[in-house]
Image (cartoon, grey):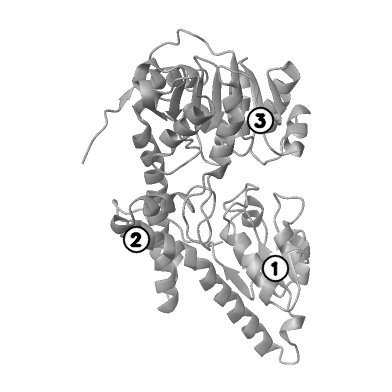
Amino acid sequence: MTTEQTEPFTAISEMPFDSISVIGLGYIGLPTAAMFASRRVNVLGVDVNPDVVDRVNKGEIHIVEPELDIVVQAVVTQGFLRASLTPEPAQAFLVTVPTPFKAENREPDLKYVKAACEAIAPVLEKGNLVILESTCPVGTTELMAEWLSAERSGLSFPQTVGENSDIRICHCPERVLPGKVMHELIANDRVIGGMTPKCSEMAVQLYKTFVSGECVVTGARAAEMAKLTENSFRDTNIAFANELSLICDQLDIDVWEIISLTNRHPRVNILQPGPGVGGHCIAVDPWFIVASAPENSRLIRTAREVNDSKPEWVLKKVDDAVNQFLKQYPKLTSDDVTVACYGLAFKPDIDDLRESPALQIAQSISKTHNGNLLVVEPNIKQLPNALSGTELVSIDEAFQRADIHVYLVAHREFKEHTKPHRFVVDTIGL
């Protein structure tokens, strides 16, 4: 067992940053770029999607995140934020690209990180800082440094010359909650994992541009592992709640009542079960630990398998509801039954569909159910291609037309609206 020293870093920047490039303008990259720009730093956001680039340059946003639209419009108008398809020279580069896993074996897929390295390598200059914010397997920051070194043999990197490197390399994982990103980017503590102390020092100077939380310095590998551990811990706790819901269903007990009763214990805090676990972090990150240490990650693997299997249980409940409906109306067939799914996002009140169990469930119903499928998702304007042939409708229309009502996401609109009393599959305790 080894330990790395972690400590708060409060040094005042000796060299203010006036040019930053953020690679990837998604759910983390765009808010981060906007936050730096709001501090009157010149920020270039880089994305491979021309539509995203065009919209940002118009002061618009392509994601749902409270307060982000106001900030983006302001900083673009003021000239502190612009977007491009290609990187340009800057003092610091923040890589905020996706890090999925390969579906066939759940191995980490780092192709986007490598592509980002290949994109920024030609414009790197001596004294630059490169920060990997994307959640990644342990060792990815070092691998990123190797990729950059291979592209720019004329520059020195920490893995070869240590503190005297031309380029500083660091890992600083994001740890914000969708729906509260603009607040948590400022208030949350940041883990700063530099490949050398000077790398960390430079990264702290950068983040102190807007971060009021504590910047805690450690090594790159510890920073990588910390983020994976955070999400694996949460995944395990959710798995307990989801497994408990299966047990209570089998024993004909109300799981919501059991959790409420149990949480009256002063040292117990069971989370709420749901249709599964989604999002790019909790549904993915535990697999990075499993891939790195498969023989010693049995609990983490089991928790992931419990949460991954929950949608199948929900689908069985939908089938049961359809069969109950047909028993009451024996002249009808499944072709005559209309199902409505309420919610597609991976969590309430956002538009993010990544790794969403609700989306997975809706897709499965669309493939196997002979009747109509309606979808109610107030945070999107059109359905993904995987749901072609289904209808995106309002809550009121779903109430009027649907026979079976499947609640998958606890959106604010669903909590505030009157709910149907018959043929309801409620996976979220509304």
Q: Dot 1: within a 10 Å radius of its alpha carbon, few (fewer than 14), some, or many (20 or more) residues?
A: many
Nearest to N terminus: mark 2 or mark 1:
2
Q: Amino acid at mark 3?
A: Val
Residue 305 vs 156, above or below: the answer is below
Labelled pair 3, 2 in contact (Cβ < 8 Å): no
Q: Earlier in the sequence, mark 3 or mark 2?
A: 3
Task: Report helix, strand or loop for mark 1.
Answer: strand
3D distance between C-alphas at marks 3 and 2? 49 Å
Taking the image as shown, residue 41 lies to the left or right of residue 107, namely right
Query: Residue 105: x and y, percent?
Result: 48, 60
Q: Are marks 2 and 1 in contact (CB under 8 Å)?
A: no
Give the position of the C terminus as an image quadrant: bottom right
- Between label 3 and label 1, give the one nearer the viewer: 3
Question: What residue does disc 1 label?
Answer: 340
Neighbour tally class for label 2: few under 14, some 14-19, many 20 plus, Cα within 10 Å: some
Q: Secondary structure at mark 2?
A: helix
Q: Nearer the viewer, residue 192 or 271?
A: 192
Image quarter of residue 93: top right
The residue that disc 2 covers is 262
**Going 51% across and 44% down the picture, which residue do you hit?**
110
Name above or below for residue 391 compared with residue 9.
below
Give the CA separation, mark 3 to mark 1.
39 Å
Disc 2 marks a residue whose amino acid type is: Thr
Q: Are marks 3 and 1 in contact (CB under 8 Å)?
A: no
Tell me the quarter of the picture where residue 84 sits. top right
Q: Position of residue 304 (x, y in %)?
A: 42, 59
Q: Nearer the viewer, residue 168 or 175?
A: 168
- Residue corresponding to mark 3: 46
Residue 9 visible in the shown view:
no
> As displayed, is residue 114 above or below residue 261?
above
Which residue is located at x 77 percent, y 60 percent?
Answer: 393
